[in-house]
Amino acid sequence: MNAPAPQHDTPGNDGSRERGSAQAQRVALGFTLAAIALAGWSLFPSFPAGQLIAVVTVIPLLALILTLRFPGRFRIGLGSGYGANLGTGCIVAAGTLAARTLSDINLVSWLPLTAFAIAVAVVFLIVAARFETQLRRRGWRLLLAAVFVSAYAFGALGQFNTALDRSAPALLRSRVVAKHLGHSRLATHQVTLEAWGPFARAADAHVAQALYERLQPGDTVCLRLGDGAFRMAWFSVAACR
């Protein structure tokens, strides 16, 4: 049985590899620009929340699929290699998702969601440190990646907890004590409500811009309190009819 002939790079193979690399770089650039554009759009109050959040959630998953399907052409930031880096788009998407969750969703307690995000970061650190041996000498890079993995977990679970909730909400009332804009670059509008339901003292709540402009201190608002798809109670604020 004849031994197989040794494989040698040919000019044709080199040209094909270069074309593939150039195509991967273009895909990575488009991927990053799309993530940045979506992040910028999310700063405006008129953005379509549901659809945009769904797309932002999918971006890191798409990057993971591309990296697993074409391991020589794409990578997600960690380690070293010549593949087109999709890490920047993932970082932007994770940050956007976490920021929108903080600014759009009202949870009764943020502790369970925060604990979940920290647990995901710890698991990521353990797995990445074991399989990405080069990163042990660059711990800051590994820690930075863990922060954004945690942000993605935080944002995704927070969004799905409300979007997938099918529980029958409890209907309650409270009174507006004050109203103010959020202290960040995000387009957030907050009202301070008197003690109600699970809150023993006055607490802030995020509301839509239209409702914020309509409400005044002393107005009564109606609240819908849901159990949450992952048992993290949340609520929304609306004007009473």
Image (tube, rainbow, N blue to C red):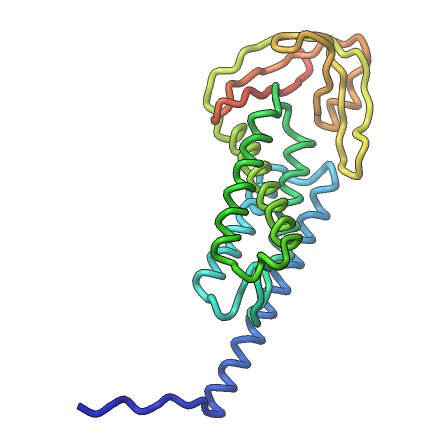
Which residue is the extreme one toward the left? Answer: 1
Residue 241 makes an appearance in the image: no
For image coordinates 54% across by 47% down, the residue present is 125
Which residue is the extreme one toward the front? Answer: 137
Left or right of residue 144, residue 55 in this image: left
Displayed quadrant of residue 195: top right
Q: Quadrant of the N terminus?
A: bottom left
For image coordinates 59% across by 41% down, the residue present is 150
Please tell me whether residue 51 is drawn above or below residue 207 in the rendered image: below
Q: Position of residue 74 (x, y in %)?
A: 53, 65
For image coordinates 68% across by 40% down, the residue present is 47
Q: Position of residue 108 (x, y in %)?
A: 61, 19
Closer-to-camera residue (169/77):
77
Left or right of residue 138, residue 2 in this image: left
Q: Position of residue 228 (x, y in %)?
A: 51, 23
For image coordinates 56% across by 51% down, the residue present is 59
Total number of numbered discs in the rendering? 0
Closer-to-camera residue (91/172):
91
Please tell me whether residue 216 is drawn above or below residue 147 in the rendered image: above
